[in-house]
Amino acid sequence: MSMINVARAAILAVAAAAPVLAETPADAASQQVRVLLKHEAALKADVLQVQVVGQTVYVRGVVDSQLESDEVDSVATAIPGAHVVNATVVTGAGS
């Protein structure tokens, strides 16, 4: 397991164990994805919006490169059973 995957697994474990103020499982999943995105140095989590409907995670926002957009997919799929709809817009600023 790579160091990035180990770090992501540790963050996911912390997010799962943290007190969740969510009212529904979808709220809890949204909160977990937001926590994971905020811990990714390359992503500007403050400009990404997360919504979970059923098992589908919708991520919208602006990223600087295709690599960052791919990272959004990677982070959001860390939620078990999640189907990800990545609607991020790549500005090309970081390409």
Image (cartoon, helix red, strand yellow):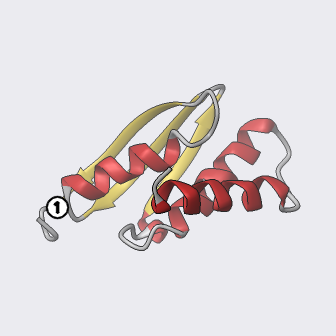
Q: Residue at x 48, y 62 (%)?
A: 3
The image shows residue 82 at horizontal and vertical percentages of 58, 30
The image shows residue 66 at horizontal and vertical percentages of 20, 52
The image shows residue 75 at horizontal and vertical percentages of 49, 50
Task: Specify whether 92 is left or right of 89.
Answer: left
- Residue at the far front in the pictured view: 1
Asked whether 92 or 23 is in front, the reply is 92
Q: Residue at x 25, y 51 (%)?
A: 89
The image shows residue 74 at horizontal and vertical percentages of 43, 45
Circle 1 Cα neighbour tier, 10 Å, few/some/many (<14 / 14–19 / ≥20)? few
Q: Residue at x 40, y 43 (%)?
A: 73
Task: Specify whether 62 is left or right of 48.
Answer: left
Rendered position, 79 above or below 43:
above
Image quadrant where residue 94 sits:
bottom left
- Residue at the far bottom in the pictured view: 41
Rendered position, 45 above or below 33:
below
Image quadrant where residue 19 sits:
bottom right
The residue carrying mark 1 is: 91
User: How many numbered markers are drawn?
Assistant: 1
Q: Residue at x 24, y 55 (%)?
A: 67
Asked whether 86 or 41 is in front, the reply is 41
Rendered position, 13 above or below 54:
below
Assign the C terminus to one quadrant of the image: bottom left
Task: Specify whether 10 is left or right of 48.
Answer: right
- Judging from the image, what secondary structure is the residue with disc 1 in? loop
Dot 1 amino acid type: Thr
